[in-house]
């Protein structure tokens, strides 16, 4: 279950993804499979090769891409924080208390 974002943020993320840009969306998240995680960052891009190449710098495997209408990696835990720091997404870290 996702919460903590508004429609405008989601719409902006989807637009960036559809344009073939690397886009970041962090939201609160509850999933019984990952009880230690309180948020997730979706890193999306409709250009799959660009997304695969981007992921390689963070040791993210192409098979981990959710190949949906909005292709994306789901990041949480230490990897989430590491990537957000490297990408300069400090507002995500502060807002979601990472």
Image (cartoon, rainbow, N blue to C red):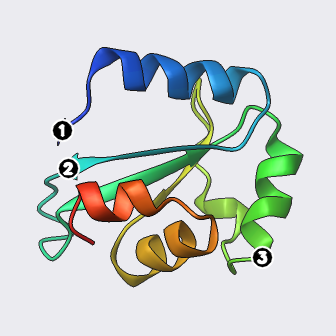
Identify the residue shown where x is 82% and y is 36%.
47
Which of 79 and 60 lies nearest the eye of the viewer? 79
Instruction: Give the vertical position of 86 relative to 38 (above or below).
Output: below
**Which x, y percent locates residue 6?**
26, 23
Q: For the residue carrying disc 3, how many other residues have a C-alpha within 10 Å: few (<14), some (14-19), or many (20+)?
A: few
Residue position marked by numbered label 3 in the rendering: 57
Q: Dot 2: what SS?
A: strand
Classed neighbour count for the residue bearing mark 1: other residues with Cα under 10 Å, few (<14), some (14–19), many (≥20):
few
Q: Secondary structure at mark 3?
A: loop
Earlier residue among tags 2 and 3: 2
**Label 2–label 3 contact, CB within 8 A:** no
For residue 91, above or below residue 79 = above
Q: Measured from the top left, where is residue 33 in percent x and y?
A: 19, 66
Q: Quadrant of the C terminus?
A: bottom left
Q: Residue at x 33, y 77 (%)?
A: 77
- Residue 90 position within the rendered picture, expressed as x and y whole percent measured from the top left: 44, 63
Tag on residue 48? none
- The image quadrant of residue 4 is top left
Q: Earlier in the sequence, mark 1 or mark 2?
A: 1
The residue at which mark 2 appears reads as 28
Tag 1–tag 3 contact (CB < 8 Å):
no
Q: Residue 4, which numbered label?
A: 1
């Amino acid at each position: 279950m996702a919460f903590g974002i508004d429609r405008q943020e989601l719409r902006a993320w989807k637009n960036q993804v559809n344009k073939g840009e690397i886009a970041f969306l962090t939201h609160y998240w509850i999933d019984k499979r990952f009880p230690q995680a309180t948020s997730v960052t979706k890193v999306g891009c409709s250009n799959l090769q660009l997304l695969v190449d981007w992921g390689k710098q963070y040791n993210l495997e192409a098979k981990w891409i959710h190949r949906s209408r909005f292709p994306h990696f789901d990041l949480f835990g230490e990897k989430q924080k590491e990537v957000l720091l490297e990408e300069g997404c400090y507002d995500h870290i502060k807002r979601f208390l990472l």
